[in-house]
Image (cartoon, grey):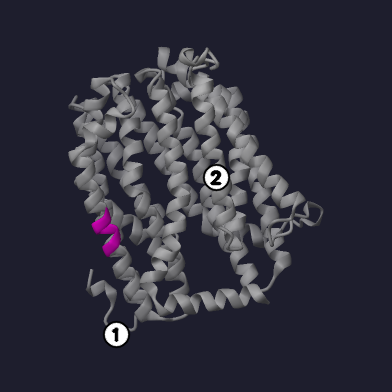
């Protein structure tokens, strides 16, 4: 079958020039992640013009959405792997059935999170530490955006399905359209726009949520039209032919669940830090949110490199091309380190300028700068840890990423932050020290775990990349 031949020729072309192949895969991934990052930054920019409390209110929603996205993206990676493998085996029926399981998962996640948001959203926000005006703003945002959760979840799984058949261009185009639409709607829904004849609705934080809901609804409609009506995909969405299969379900879950759990743990960590930081002030929570959006830019190319490494390592390992495997691992880690080192220097020296883009509140800016200038010192180590984890995923080891995340977030960063802040009454910077210690520890665990795994797969007579790192 043609798809299988294309897959084989692609592996051969990657082997001819592994370094070039890394960027061939990384650049489209970077573009896709960049679209989402750009949306997040613009959204925060508009919200920041409302008030610092508005930023803090939205910040308390982030653990909830990070949890939902974690399940969607994590299980989506399992869907992508499952569909790709079935297509490679020329087993279209199973590939179609795997896509059917993906839609069933999307439906389940959508129902659970929507009902939780509607009936228990305010209590969850209180549990996360929101109170008074911050709670009101957080609930104003959540009570609106919860309506759009199903559109976000289904669109995420549609992207994973298309990635499984090798179609990255179409999902990125649709995501770009959604981002542009959201940027256009944000100021109209958030502000009254008196200078333009009061054409805006002036809905504040709720308007930001409504703009997101509408843009995500349109993205969802386009996906449904193109996939179910125009039959754009190689995958066939014949729901009447869907047959529940525990084998296919486990095939998806065993790959996707460790990644999902890792993001769930990070969402929990985000919630813990919000709850700790609110004890300092709402401005501190807002600063944490601002700084977090900025460091997303630092790691944008790293996530792209790491994502492409998973594919290349898996291909080269499967083909038993150990020289190419070792070469691409060393090259990928080296690129991640030096790119992050360069971007960290830029953020360190221009932290105040970057932070002031999102808010004019000097207290928020000062705390954000303190966070960025300290965390920049460990960002290069974090980039190596991220890339090492993806390398191990490419080798078929999903558990290391989960364990490393557990150690970093629940074992070190969060407990140390609680101890420093609530027991020793240290200044807010000590929370950043806790994160730095967790990041440094995860680096040492990740790099050494990867060395061990590489020694297992390399021929002892050949020079292993582990001896170079």
**Residue that lies at the very extreme toward the front in this rendered image:** 196
Residue at 38% from the left image edge and 23% from the top image edge: 48
Q: What residue do we see at 52% from left, 30% from top?
A: 184
Real-space CA distance between mark 2 and mark 1, rounded to the nearest whole angstrom: 45 Å
Residue sitting at x 58%, y 51%: 171
The residue lying toward the viewer, choosing from 18 and 161, is 18
Q: Residues within 10 Å of mark 1 (few under 14, many from 20)?
A: few
Residue hosting label 2: 175
Residue 335 magenta-drawn?
yes
Give the class, few, some or many, for how many residues have Cα within 10 Å of label 2's Cα (few <14, many ≥20). Answer: many
> Of helix, strand and loop, which one carries label 2?
helix
The label shown at residue 462 is: 1
Q: Is residue 319 above or below residue 76?
A: below
Q: Quadrant of the N terminus?
A: bottom right
Can residue 51 be found in the magenta stretch?
Answer: no
Please report the residue visible at 74 percent of the width from the left and 65 percent of the height from the top: 93
Number of numbered discs overlaid on the protein picture? 2
Residue 91 lies, in percent from the top left, at: 69, 70
């Amino acid at each position: 079958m043609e798809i299988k031949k294309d897959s084989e020729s692609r592996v051969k072309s990657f082997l001819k020039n592994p370094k070039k192949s890394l960027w061939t895969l990384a650049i489209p991934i970077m573009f896709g992640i960049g679209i989402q990052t750009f949306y997040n930054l613009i959204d925060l920019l508009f919200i920041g013009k409302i008030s610092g409390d508005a930023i803090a209110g939205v910040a308390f929603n982030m653990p909830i959405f990070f949890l939902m996205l974690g399940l969607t993206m994590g299980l989506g990676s399992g869907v992508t792997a499952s569909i790709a493998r079935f297509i490679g085996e020329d087993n279209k029926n199973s590939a179609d059935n795997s896509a059917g399981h993906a839609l069933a998962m999307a439906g389940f996640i959508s129902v659970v999170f929507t009902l939780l948001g509607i009936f228990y959203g305010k209590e969850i926000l209180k549990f996360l530490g929101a109170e008074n005006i911050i709670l009101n703003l957080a609930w104003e945002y959540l009570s609106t955006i919860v309506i759009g959760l199903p559109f976000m979840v289904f669109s995420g799984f549609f992207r994973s399905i298309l990635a499984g058949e090798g179609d990255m261009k179409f999902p990125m185009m649709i995501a770009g359209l959604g981002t542009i639409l959201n940027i256009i709607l944000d100021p109209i829904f958030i502000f009254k726009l008196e200078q333009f004849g009061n054409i805006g609705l002036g809905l504040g934080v709720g308007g930001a949520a409504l703009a997101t809901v509408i843009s995500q609804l349109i993205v969802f409609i386009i996906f449904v039209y193109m996939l179910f009506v125009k039959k754009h995909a190689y995958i066939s969405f014949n729901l009447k032919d869907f047959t529940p299969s525990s084998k296919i379900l486990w095939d998806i879950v065993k790959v996707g669940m460790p990644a999902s759990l890792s993001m769930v743990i990070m969402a929990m960590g985000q919630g813990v830090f919000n709850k700790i930081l609110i004890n300092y002030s709402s401005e501190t929570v807002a600063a944490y949110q601002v700084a977090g959006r900025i460091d997303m830019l630092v790691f944008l190319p790293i996530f792209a490199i790491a994502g492409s490494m998973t594919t290349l390592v898996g291909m080269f390992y499967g083909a038993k091309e150990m020289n190419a495997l070792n070469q691409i691992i060393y090259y990928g880690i080296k690129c991640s380190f030096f790119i992050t080192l360069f971007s960290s220097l830029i953020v360190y020296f221009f932290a105040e300028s970057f932070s002031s883009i999102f808010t004019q509140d000097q207290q928020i800016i000062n705390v954000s700068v303190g966070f960025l200038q300290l965390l920049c010192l460990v960002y290069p180590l974090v980039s190596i840890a991220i890339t090492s984890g993806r390398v191990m995923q490419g080798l078929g080891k999903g558990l290391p990423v989960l364990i490393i995340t557990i150690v970093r977030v629940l074992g070190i960063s969060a407990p140390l932050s609680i101890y420093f802040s609530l027991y020793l009454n240290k200044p807010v910077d000590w929370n950043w020290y806790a994160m730095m210690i967790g990041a440094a520890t995860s680096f040492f665990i990740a790099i050494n775990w990867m060395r061990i795994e590489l020694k297992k797969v390399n021929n002892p007579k050949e020079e292993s990349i582990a001896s170079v790192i």
